[in-house]
Amino acid sequence: MPVTSTLFRRAVTSPTLRKLAVLVLIVVAYQVWLSVQAGGKAGPGVGAERDPRGRFSVDVRLGFAPERYHILQLQKHGRIAGTDGQVVHLRGVAPAGVDALAREYWIKKIEAPEPGAR
């Protein structure tokens, strides 16, 4: 019998390798889910009014009042300009920051700020 088929059979029957394969599958499925659900979070007009550096303002809508953890995570992508209930106003956000914010499962919506709200 060839050595490769014996190694393959042993790998398939190994409980440790099966557990590792299930773990990898779970992580990949979670990453796919994050990417799929991120698609509809950025609203129309996000990034339309850019400054000379290519950055813009966004309003991040949460399903709850933000806590310290959420504010610190949002600060990685822009400057906090304030909060209104469940909405956090961010300034100086790069396009890559919007993509990263959309992948956060606890963010409901990313919207362009209302005109005159700067």
Image (cartoon, rainbow, N blue to C red):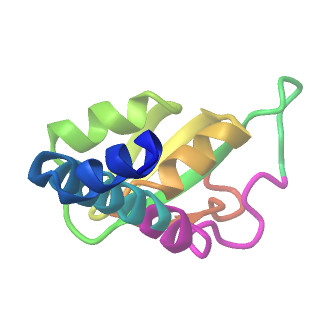
Kindly indicate the quadrant of the structure image that contains residue 110. Answer: bottom right
**Who is closer to the viewer here, 25 or 6?**
6
Instruction: Return the x and y of residue 116 as percentages of the image width and height.
Output: 69, 56
Instruction: Return the x and y of residue 46 as percentages of the image width and height.
Output: 72, 59
Q: Residue at x 61, y 48 (%)?
A: 98
- Residue furthest right as drawn: 52
**Who is closer to the viewer here, 10 or 99?**
10
Q: Residue at x 20, y 67 (%)?
A: 64
- Magenta segment: does it hold 41? yes
- In the image, residue 28 above or below residue 91: below
- Residue furthest top as drawn: 53
The boundaries of the magenta stretch are 33-48
- In the image, residue 85 above or below residue 66: below
Instruction: Return the x and y of residue 97 as percentages of the image width and height.
Output: 60, 39
* Overall secondary structure of the magenta section: loop
- Magenta segment: does it hold 54? no
| Left or right of residue 93, residue 29 in this image | left
- Residue furthest left as drawn: 15
Kindly indicate the quadrant of the structure image that contains residue 4. Answer: top left
Instruction: Return the x and y of residue 29 as percentages of the image width and height.
Output: 39, 65
Q: Residue at x 54, y 63 (%)?
A: 35
| Left or right of residue 116, residue 65 in this image | left
